[in-house]
Image: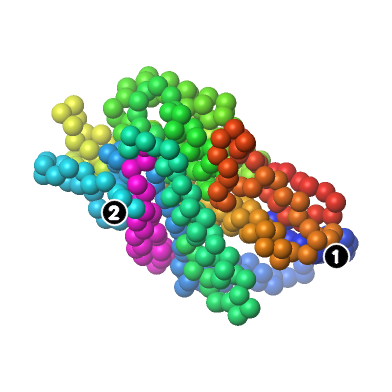
Amino acid sequence: MDPLRQSPSPSSSRASSPRTLPCEMLGYVGIEAVLDQLKIKAMKMGFEFNIMVVGQSGLGKSTMVNTLFKSKMCKSTMPGLGVPTPQTLQLQSVTHVIEESGVKLKLTVTDTPGFGDQINNDKCWDPILGYISEQYEKYLQEEILITRQRHIPDTRVHCCVYFVPPTGHCLRPLDIEFLQRLCRTVNVVPVIARADSLTIEEREAFRHRIQENLKTHGIEVYPQKCFDEDINDKILNSKIRERIPFAVVGADREHIVNGRCVLGRKTKWGIIEVENMAHCEFPLLRDLLIRSHLQDLKDITHNVHYENYRIFRLNESHVLPRGPGWVNLAPAPASIPAPAGPQASPRPPKVCWWAKDNSDEEC
């Protein structure tokens, strides 16, 4: 069993499991059919995925979401209509069911206020962090009921895509301050928005400066090194970490290029193809969020971020009795509002908490 899912019972940690010996099979049994059973059941139930987009107004957040899922998930202002871009005054969530080849995905996209748009941006992250914690609390309240639902609705944010403006310099102090808090409570994937406004050389230099900023300030974005489960994960995730933040361009219109119908954005210099790696790194972002790491994002949300929140709340409310199974907590994760100022730890803690007898383990 996954250690993150182990019961905090002291007896379970002391119990010695019998030695498992390999058994030679004399014929076909059909154990492999379990995979088909799981697939049929999963296709009947469908999947849920909740994504949040954070960034300044005008960075193409809505267009990027529409490009990712090739659907009109979010409304964006059409250019040339002379209508000013509306400012989002409160967090807004929209849910759609997308079906492809018989697989249903219930997708919820949460748009955020234009982060950093105001003159005074003091604690402008509070509504976002509060929303994330609120979804954890909703799930927790359903989970601790005596009579629980067979399937608890999952509104927890599985991934936050953070849009960095293409300044070409480095992360702003506001970005650093917010990311330090955000990475403690949710999976964060930073991207360089509107990357077509930078040259290839400027883009690479900007990426390296952002990577240095993240390293210097102890900001661990997804995929985190401590969650690589085996050598294959380490190889794949290392390649991803080298390219983060992805330089992306969003577009939801199709154009004809050399007889091919491509998704892209037309400029006076030509057409920027969003699915062409020579033009931008949108394919890397799409593969990470949907094709290779979607389930892993959900697993880390449940086993790490939500588990941190759950343990803190249970300890806080004295539900867990003190004893061998008592959890000794590190400083509170950012999903619970932490004190601001120099008292707050600038480095997000790398912790996966679960009960152990007289021992604390880190990832």
Q: Point out residue 89 in the picture as x, y percentages from the top left corner.
A: 31, 50
Look at 78% across and 64% down and name the residue there: 321
Q: Is residue 185 magenta?
A: no
* Numbered tag placed on residue 11 in the rendering: 1
Where is 202 relative to 280, above or below? above
Residue 188 visible in rendering: yes
Q: Point out residue 119 in the picture as x, y percentages from the top left corner.
A: 33, 34
Where is 231 relative to 316, above or below? above
Magenta range: 91-116
Q: Point out residue 167 in the picture as x, y percentages from the top left corner.
A: 35, 25
In what quadrant of the picture does the C terminus appear?
A: top right
Where is 245 relative to 318, above or below? above
In what quadrant of the picture does the N terminus appear?
A: bottom right
Q: Residue furthest left?
A: 81
Say whether residue 361 is left or right of residue 332. right
Look at 21% across and 43% down and name the residue there: 85
Type of the residue with mark 1: Ser
Type of the residue with mark 2: Cys
Which residue is at the front of the view, 303 or 262? 303
Q: Based on the displayed image, in which of its 4 quarters is residue 171 positioned?
A: top left
**Residues at marks 2 and 1 touching, judged by CB atoms closer than 8 Å:** no
Name the residue tied to disc 2.
74
**Label 2 packing within 10 angstroms: few (<14), some (14-19), many (20+):** some
